[in-house]
Image: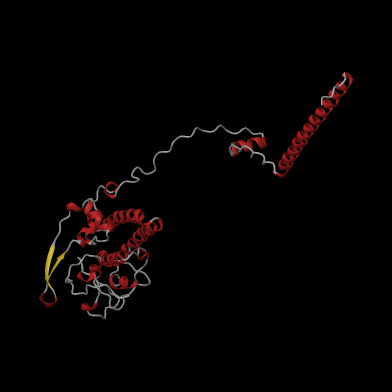
Amino acid sequence: MTTAFSDAQAAQLALIVDAVVEKRLQASADARKAADDAAAAAAAAAAAATPAPPPPPPNPVTATPAQLLAAATGVPAPSAQPLTALPSANPLAGKPAYVRFPSVSQAVLLEIMSHKLSFKDLIKLDVSYSRVSTETVLSLGEGGRINCDNKVTSKHFATPAVMLNCLSVYFDVLTYHIGSSMGFEAAFTVSHAWHITQRRILQFAATYKWNSIISFLEEYYYKRIAEMLDGQFSGWWNTDSNLESFWLAGNLLTGSSGSTLLSSRAPGARSVPSGNSSASSSTRKDESKPKSEQICYAFLAGACASPCRHGRKHEKPST
């Protein structure tokens, strides 16, 4: 059934519809505003919970101490000199041994670094070595054995200056090798050993006959070689009162009173004849032992072939 509205009723109905629509639109707008307000409040709460980042650090002070002093006292600082590159402290840095020591043959360098250089071959470190003649003497030893002695030691090391010159090169090469392979402390040990050895030789030379000093140094050298082959380098720092008593006591220079230790001939000490002594290849800590029971330190250093020409034992001492 169709209901007819009058114009007045239609107008009233339109007003009611418009009011309902407007009310719904207002409710929707209020809901959106409430949601936006809630989101803003949540963001503000989150921002309040997060600490503010720290301020940036202050710029570093680039002024020099002189400039800071000038700013504090009011006295102008002197103008700084321009920086210039320093020259290389060591032009041989990183170079091998044969470049660092051109006057020493590579064969001798290898013998030094492997602790195989014999005492008499130290003379090869002297520039005048090629001008020195050698002399070989044959002698009849125990049991009919023929000994072949190269009597060059006393001739080559005729003065303390020659001995010191050779040893200075020896320790220079040794310090380089030990430093490059074992580090600073080992290199310092060897370097300081040279200063101790040099001072000791000069003290001996002012008190004792030079031939007896050479005999002492030869045996002392071979004992240090044996230690270095075992990785010990501090033995050069030590004195050896047994060797000093045996080789130096009783061999004072004319007018010299000697040291307290060696002022008189010690038991078992003897004068040393000129030339190289064949007894210098073994230890003399106990002279009561027969020669066949003594250790040959020259053999331990690789400087004496078997059988021992002096009749001593070619074996490592028991520890």
Name which residue lies at 72% across and 39% down.
43
Which color scheme is applied? secondary structure
Between 23 and 98, the one lying in front of the other is 23
Among all residues in the image, which is located at the extreme right?
Answer: 8
Q: Residue furthest front?
A: 1
Q: Residue furthest top?
A: 7
The residue located at (26%, 48%) in the rendering is: 98
Against 49, residue 299 (above or below) is below
- In this rendering, the answer to whether 315 lies above or below 90 is below
Residue 48, by quadrant, is top right
User: Taking 107 as reference, is 89 left or right?
Assistant: right
Q: Residue at x 61, y 35 (%)?
A: 67
Residue pictured at 27% horizontal, 72% vertical: 316
Above or below, 105 relative to 229: above
Quadrant the C terminus occupies:
bottom left
Residue 254: x %, y % from top left = 29, 67
Q: How many marks?
A: 0
> Which of the 4 image quadrants contains residue 18?
top right
Q: Is residue 110 visible?
A: yes
Frontmost residue, 138 versus 201: 138
Q: Position of residue 41 (x, y in %)?
A: 76, 39
Which sits in the foreground, 20 or 301? 20
Residue 73 percent across, percent down from the top left? 67, 36
Image coordinates of residue 240 in percent, x first then y, are 34, 70
Q: Looking at the rendering, in which quadrant would you find the N terminus?
A: top right
Instruction: Give the image quarter of residue 239.
Output: bottom left
